[in-house]
Image (cartoon, rainbow, N blue to C red):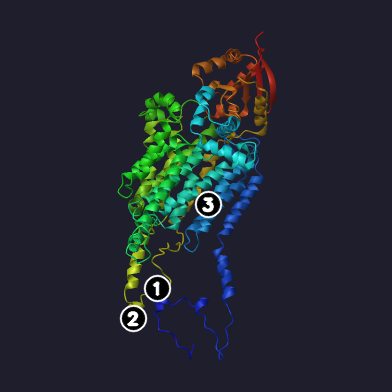
Amino acid sequence: MPGQQVPDTPRAHEPPAHDSRTREEPTPHTTREPATGAPAARPARAAAAWPAVPLLAALALWGYAVRHTDVSALDDYGLVGALHPAFWVGLAVLTAGFWFTVRDPRRRSRWPLAHVLGLLVMERATQALLYPTPLYAWAWKHDAVVDHLLTSGGLQDADRLGDMAVYDQWPGFFAAQAALVRLLGVDNAAMYMAWWPLVSSVLLLLPLLLIYRTFTTDRRLIWTAVWLFCVANWVGQDYFSPQSVAFALHLGVLAVVLRRYSSRTSGSSGSSGPSASSGSSASSGSDGPKGLDGPDGRGGVRQGQAVWAVLLSLLVVAVVVSHQLTPGMLVVTLLALALTRRHRDWLPLVTTVVIFLAWCLTAALPFLSAAMPDMIRSVGDVGANVETGYGTTPTGAGAVAMSWAARLLSGSALLLALAGVLRQRVLRRRAFPLLLLAAAPLPMFVASSYGSEMIFRVLMFMLPGAAFFAAAALLPRVRATAAEAADAADAAARNAERPSGPSRRRFALPSFSLPSFSPPSPPRLRYGAWLAPLVLLAGTLAFVPSYSGKDRINYFPPREVALVQRLFDQAPDGSLVVAANRNYPLAYEQYWRVDHYWFLDDDRRHVDEIVRDPAGVLARDMAAVDAPARAYFLLTQGQTANSEMNGQLNEAQLRHVRESVAGSPRFERVAENSAGVLYVLKPAS
């Protein structure tokens, strides 16, 4: 302004002209210009909030679809054939909104987070809203274990519980759920376990973000990796189970190890991740306050290390007491990390091994002693360990199609990860520990079949590392790794110490800051650039048949639940329940006082005998029950669906079994509805 002296400062440090801090105050000889900041701020705020439009539109379409979806008559395509078309449109809108939001460097991380949470709601909460009862026979089984702890008030051994004693030897999850049931004041865990897939999936977000942020500051890469992890994690271990919590704890341990036990961070307890290496080295020579234990503050460092060691130990203990397989996966992963130069700190591995062995040699010793011969025989038999076996082969057009959708989704995710490794050279070096996370579970194929589920568990434990490199394959060259950001910060600090003469002033860029290392503005999408969002959309849509394509097996209508509950309400102690398979609700209800026999789990020759003469063979098998106990035969629609879709008995064979029992004078019908029938064996005269 004329008549005022303006300090001669470098132009590089001048704030933007629109900044209110530099607005000139009017003098008596000047008139204030009309303020234009408020009207200009409104379009800026509107532009900043535009990612809410596709998010809200997707959720509105999802809500409409949920209200107009009928699940009363599911076919072999599960929920896929029942969903309203608005669901698919909403999922596509959400994916498109996420892709364009995450590529825009002007958007804050809260918008990608909001889209990921929207994805989890659409993926994991849809079934909880559509189905009036919880899914999965295994979830009902775990509810029975919680009920046993609440009823007995303590742990019991195999002499009283038989095979079910294994859950009392790894009681961490069930004891926590028993405490939660009492805290909430509900009757049992079935009151909330339908929502467990959503809860357990949200729990994974924090450790995932911590792990990915250890190796990159590129927001695009971090959130795309999280998205891909969510859509590729279809294996169904997020239900009400110890595995769901143990997996989250497993990732929590890895986050602590990767961020606090790296060679780049071992010198400073306040640093985190590789990006802190330069900061710790710079601060070591500062003249700040010294610690109480010496001029170099080593006492504070030791105290910080002790805190993280305690946290690590608590996480490992929680994993070990809750699940059988996850500690083994954790050991092989920590071993792989310890063999690298960057993470050559043996404390996490030794801590995990000691705690794991201590538990195996004490509380879990009875189970391991009985199971050890079979475990030893399975070591090295890779073919048998990955074989699905009888009764788990998809049968029928719908079951086969849903199975192939899951296989293609998993195969595509792994191929994308391989492409990311080959394409992003800088990540092969900077994020090498994530490669180890993806590869470390593979040797478990050699160790055990884990009930024909090892292939699915290995895939799940590979996903955190694989999703990171799969995301890198969908993005342009990734530049903003944590180490590069630290190098850029060092360079900026060195440049700031140099005198800025007139010759340097013209090179200053007031709108650019090296330490922030923000990714560039998203380029206009050319023909080839559409490939990445289309791949992301295809994977997102493929999750639904992979995850919900077998809901005809996993869903039990209220009539089926009521029929089984009626059985246990009247069964005396010592009774026997005979069923085709264990795929029905409350299959393990009151297992501490009622025995169960599922004849399709028996030797195939005996199954063939039952098919030839159902009533005669079943009556013979059930005759050993002594009064006042009773022997019941139960056949429900859940058992029928599982048998038909997994290649056990077909519809005609099951109908023959039911008609034979119905026509036999040895059996009396107790209850029947549209979801099943219950018979009791008459006492021998």
At mark 3, the secondary structure is helix
| Residue named by callout 3 | 116
Q: Are marks 2 and 1 in contact (CB under 8 Å)?
A: no
**Cα distance between the residues tagged 2 and 1:** 14 Å
Query: Which callout, 3 or 2, points at the residue further toward the start of the chain?
Result: 3
Image vertical order of residue 652 relative to residue 502, above or below: above
Q: Secondary structure at mark 1?
A: loop
Rendered image quadrant of residue 505: bottom left
Residue 398 in picture, x, y percent from top left: 55, 34
Q: Nearer the viewer, residue 217 or 532?
A: 217
Disc 2 designates what residue? 502
The residue sitting at 53% across, 58% down in the picture is 111
The amino acid marked with disc number 2 is: Pro
Q: Is residue 439 visible?
A: no
* Residue 499: percent from left, percent from top: 32, 76
Q: Is residue 63 left or right of residue 443?
A: right
Left or right, 450 with respect to 266, comes to right
User: In percent of the image, x 36 and y 42: which residue is there?
Assistant: 349
Instruction: Answer few, some or many: residues within 10 Å of disc 2's Cα (few below 14, many 20 plus, some between 14 and 19).
Output: few
Question: Label 1: which residue?
Answer: 509
Which of the two discs, 3 and 1, labels the residue nearer the N terminus? 3
Label 2 element class: helix
